[in-house]
Amino acid sequence: MTTEAAATTAPADIVVALAGNPNAGKTTVFNAITGAHQHVGNYPGVTVEKKEGGRRFDGVAIHVVDLPGTYSLTAYSLEEVVARNYVIEERPDVVIDVVDASNLERNLYLTTQFIELGVPVVVCLNMVDVAESRGRSIDTELLSELLGVPVVPAVASRAEGIEELLRVAVETAREGRVPQRQVRYGRELESHIVEIADLIVQAGGGTREVPARWMAIKLLEDDDEVRREVEEALEDGDNLLARVDRVRAHLESVIGDDAELALADRRYGFINGACAEAVSSSAETPVDWSERIDAVVTSRILGIPIFLLLMGGMFELVFRLGAPPMGWLETAFGWLGTYVSALLPDGPLQSLIVDGIIGGVGGVLVFVPQIMLLFLAISLLEDSGYMSRAAFVVDKLMHHIGLHGKSFIPMLIGFGCTVPAIMATRTLESRRDRLTTMLVTPLMSCGARLPVYVLLAGAFFAPQVAGKVIFSVYLLGVLLAIVMARVFRSTILRGPLTPFVMELPPYRMPTLKGTLLHMWERAWCYVKKAGTVILAASVIIWALLTYPQPPAGTDLAGEPEIAYTVAGRIGHILEPAIRPLGFDWKVGISLTAGLAAKEIVVSTLATTYSIGESEESGAPAVREALRQDPIFSPLVAYALMIFVLIYPPCIASMVVLWREAGSWKWLAFAVLYTIALAWLMSFIVYQGGRLLGFG
Amino acid sequence: MQSNLSDLRSGPVMTLDMMRRGESGVVADLRGGHGVTRRLIEMGIVPGVSLRLVIDSGRAGPVIVQVGDARVGLGRGMARRVLVRPDEA
């Protein structure tokens, strides 16, 4: 652990690792335990998000580490490896395994793996209210005895049971109480597990941290990580592995099945045995709302229309509700600019603060209401459970472009922000699928591009059509993503289609607190970016737009002074390349600056125009200035929106793509192809529009 | 629900994608490579488990099955790798 939040700087008495299936309510438990004392970082070396938090309980300083949500501890996905390695290497004092009580059997599968690993585990039986509402009552004491680990019932969304959970966790950690039972795999499998475990011990392997029995079971499952470790760390590792392979072949012939499947079967047997005794279901099964909703929402006929309706509604909501507060913020920043102008004497300082900082950062911050609404909508889709249904509904369509439904989730998150969207491609198992999704996700228009559309559509289109114009840009992004995915999958990333499996969690009423927290976490990143990257970029761009100033008496040939500055010159160099798209050098400046982040296109336009021509600042003034500029027309504005849609979204997203794709070649490819595509599409729109007489 | 593996080998089996909506059955076997099997296991789809086809989006589309209290979506290709012995109607 390298970094600690302020709240958790005190040395922790107890380190708790929070584990559990995705959708088991792990985040809710984490929030209920730590409250506001959280810190988000990354696991070393990988871009898996690492949340940490602290809490004092009964005089004990507890440090909580949130492990990635996983279904098991195989070495199959990055998340699983991270979770497993954390538990093995960092040795938390206790693992709290959050289990969805309404989906007990499947969730306990992960629990059996912690039991096997021999670490102190406490099961947090979350959402017992949901289980009860379905007529299932769980005897936690009996379950605890059968599983050999403490079990604490909880309803984390109402913070019920959290105190008891912490009490038991502290107790378990203090006593170092390891699981009291083991999964027994039956005579045939057991004899081989024991045999291999003995060989491991003879070869000098097997410790308290990594029990030989666990290693033996993993080897029978053909676990790549453990195999590698045996090969590297144990003497005679190769021989041991050869023996393992023989045993696996033998098992397959005796039980007629994969050893892995047979082991899983026994684990489920252990779980089912425990559940059969500890869980009682009332005879009447109440109405299953999830099933009823699914029957409509995922149906063959209504699935797609409902999906489109929800998406359309989401954007409508964002723009309608977001517009008034945006107006208030514009007025506020405009007023602030005027006020500071009056306070400071004319000169570079006034220009820096008013045009550079207030114009630049303010121009970005006014979009906070809309960004927050967009994130709110995405959080609602995720937390309610609809997101995975959307993946299901579009699966068939996605097959046509060589991807499957799961790829759709990163693309949907891409409407919020490209960075987490690219990170979300990790749930895809095949590398080809991942790369394809990563390459097309930036085409999903992220929140940062929205300000550009709002500004341009607001300036050049009537209020009644502005929303539709923006929607069409989003739609174009989706269509291009489809086309490009198809192209990539049939050229550079050709390969077989990987099958699609995905859990569809029951529908849940999203909690107010959870959704708002979710939204806030993401919106805060945007605000932080405005305060740091964009502030710095605004100052730099302001300087580039201001200096050098033409000496008095220079003949500017009718162009504004800004043409003489560094930025003006860069713009002029670019102009021949973007002239066919209808853009001039001023647009060139903004587009160059926009490579850092798309919001900067807006702030740069603001700075360019307010320095260039008008005395006022603020977005209404920029809109007016744009309208006054003869180079602009609705057609040029639309071509510009399309260019902004397609070319690389921001530095941050490109860095993430580079890290996730694991090679700078993919980064270079992504940057070049998006710029080329942006140019081509803008060209088609502008020149085509002119031919049709829209110019 | 503990299964006797040898038991599962008898009786007619079909692949999951052949089942009709509302039909239920017991998983007889999983076909396909490592990664595929592993994903299915994690989702609780293992030999001996009962499941019911809840939604079938037809032809090349995915299906939704109910496994215990969990609902799992499977692409058509994946559904073809799950062998099911249907319950007698």
Image (cartoon, rainbow, N blue to C red):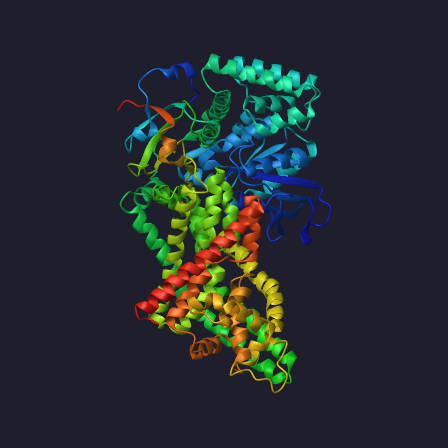
Give how far across and how far down residue A426 sits, in percent: 51, 42
Please name the residue shown 36% across and 66% down the image. Answer: A687
Q: Which percent across, then down, holds residue A606? A: 52, 73
Question: Would residue A93 be seen by someone viewing this image from the given angle?
Answer: yes
- Asked whether A204 or A295 is in front, the reply is A204
Residue drawn at x 68%, y 49% is A3
Number of callouts in the render?
A: 0
Q: Is residue A377 above or below residue A127?
A: below
Residue sitting at the far bottom: A553
Q: Give the position of the N terminus of chain A as an image quadrant.
A: top right
In the foreground, A274 or A652: A652
Q: Position of residue A81 (x, y in %)?
A: 58, 35
Residue at the image position 69 percent from the left and 16 percent from the top? A202
Occupied quadrant, residue A64:
top right
Q: Provide residue A283's location: percent of width, then percent of height.
A: 35, 31
Task: Please tell me in which quadrant of the rendered image residue A445 appears.
Answer: bottom left
Can residue A30 be seen at all in this image of the molecule?
Answer: no
Q: Nearer the viewer, residue B69 or A218?
A: A218
Give the vertical position of A590 relative to A284 (above or below).
below
| Quadrant including the C terminus of chain A | bottom left
Pick the front one: A649 or A218: A649
- Which residue does the image show at 60% across and 17% down from the upper left? A242
